Amino acid sequence: MGKNLVQQARGHGGPTYRAPSFRYAGKISHRTWSAQNIKGNVIDLLKCPGHSAPLMVIEYEDGDRNLTVAPEGIRVGDEVVAGPTAPIGLGNTVQLQNLPEGALVHNLEASPGDGGKFVRTSGGAGRIVTKMTDKIIVKMPSLKNREFHPACRASLGIIGGSGRTEKPFMRAGTKHFHMKAKNKLWPKTSGGAQNAVDHPFGNKRTQRKSKARPAPRNAPPGRKVGMIRPPRSGRKR
């Protein structure tokens, strides 16, 4: 009898895939939307096992504290401003429509007021390419251009920790403990190297492991792996 695939086992409450969220510093986001600019001070810099980027704690004038990603060059005691017309400065949170073309931004909102969804990893930054009346085009770290609503907010600067991926792990044990801190499944075995009962691409104990065939058109979620069958086009005969 077969076993569930990795895609089918995720999210079913097993300890293998349960993130240790009790060790995380908290959820990062922009502060609550305000029509007026408000000043704040950076009171602490944190390292969270759930985030690759360093985090900073901002305390605003109204007493509100906010946790967000820290850009390069920010220090404890620096002043930041959040608001629709905040000045252009490191760590400030501004609407995209009030930023010039070429500005480097991070933690962009997908829709106005959601707190930030894009460009949140260490060393990441997006660049404003084109400004229009109804949309702002930002070049993402993946080099793809994405459209945003002009009222979406973003923070200025490049996220800290840009050299994280340049240092090699060197040892398998180092990578093991790095992945264990976030409770990520590692190492990952390819489908072609597994047995037939464990994966649709699994095969015999031979040198040629791969058995990649298009997945069935009506396959259940988790079974559609590898080569996905293209949609049908043309007139049915």
Image (tube, rainbow, N blue to C red):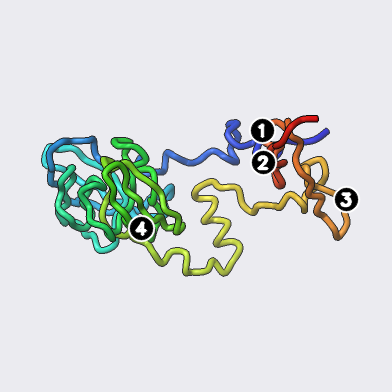
> Contact, CB < 8 Å: mark 2 with mark 4?
no
| Kind of residue at badge 1 | Pro
**Residue assigned mark 2:** 6
Q: Nearer the viewer, mark 1 or mark 3?
A: 1
Place residue 236 in its image quadrant: top right
| Kind of residue at badge 4 | Ala
Query: Callout 2: 10 Å neighbours few (<14), some, many (20+)?
Result: some
Query: Marks 2 and 4, how far apart in space?
Result: 32 Å
Q: Secondary structure at mark 4?
A: loop
Residue 95 x/y as whole percent: 23, 45
In the rendered structure, the answer to whether residue 15 lies left or right of residue 97 reads: right
Residue 75 x/y as whole percent: 21, 60
Q: Earlier in the sequence, mark 1 or mark 2?
A: 2
- The tag on residue 221 is 1
Front position in the image: 182 or 209: 209
Query: Marks 2 and 3, how far apart in space?
Result: 20 Å
> Contact, CB < 8 Å: mark 1 with mark 2?
no
Q: Residue at x 21, y 58 (%)?
A: 90
> Contact, CB < 8 Å: mark 1 with mark 3?
no
Q: Nearer the viewer, mark 1 or mark 2?
A: 1
Vertical placement of residue 74 versus 232, above or below:
below
Place residue 223 in its image quadrant: top right
In the rendered structure, the answer to whether residue 206 lies left or right of residue 8 reads: right
**Residue assigned mark 3:** 204
**Residue assigned mark 4:** 125
Q: Residue at x 16, y 56 (%)?
A: 78
Q: Earlier in the sequence, mark 2 or mark 3?
A: 2
| Kind of residue at badge 2 | Val
| Kind of residue at badge 3 | Lys
Q: Residue at x 50, y 50 (%)?
A: 181
